[in-house]
Image: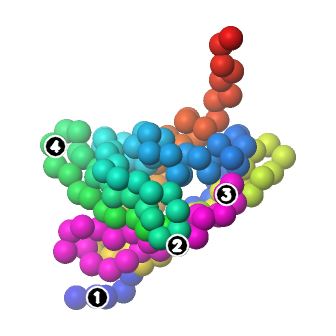
Amino acid sequence: MSSETGTVRLHRVLRAPAERVYKAFTDKSALERWLPPFGFTGTIHAIDVRVGGGYRMSFTNFGTGSSHSFTVEYVELVPNERIRHTDRFDDANLPGEMLVSIDLNAVSCGTDINIVQEGIPSVIPVEMCYLGWQESLEQLARLVEPDIPDNG
């Protein structure tokens, strides 16, 4: 069995301020809304936004009801600029630790976001991770890009 791991790199420009994008990565309700890929619901069981803290989350397949969970630990938090965290699947068949780095840079039209996910278990095809991230980022854009004023 191969012990090699995969890496996924994603780049997007979001029409939203970096503060709003950063909040979407650190807010329980926001993560539950945008992070699960299409066809999944997300539940965060606990969240503690600080270095050394993190969250535990489940993705549930809406069609079948089956779910898988993972634990995130924050290793670096620079408000509105950078987030680094480790991810571990709770399933023993998906061993090892992944490292996710999210870099946010304010640009003229919003926020330039770079995501690198390293250490993806060899049993998970990298292209499936890439596809999942693409779906998540589409949902992220729909959450952070609308500029809706408060009424009153």
Specify the quadrant of the image occupied by residue 148: top right
Q: Which residue is mark 1?
A: 2
Counting residues from the start of the chain, the first of labels 3 and 4 encountered is 4
Distance between the Cα atoms at labels 4 and 1? 30 Å
- As drawn, the residue found furthest toward the right would be 108
Q: Which residue is mark 4?
A: 65
Mark 2 or 1: in front is: 2
Distance between the Cα atoms at labels 2 and 1? 27 Å
In reply to whether residue 100 is colored magenta, the answer given is yes
Callout 2: SS: strand
The local crowd at label 2, few if under 14, some if 14 to 19, many if 20 or more residues have their Cα within 10 Å, is some
Going 20% across and 52% down the picture, which residue do you hit?
Answer: 67
Callout 3: SS: loop
Mark 4 or 1: in front is: 4
Position of residue 130 relative to residue 88, above or below, is: above
Position of residue 65 relative to residue 134, above or below, is: above
Residue 72 numbered mark, or none:
none
Residue type for callout 2: Val
Going 31% across and 41% down the picture, which residue do you hit?
Answer: 41
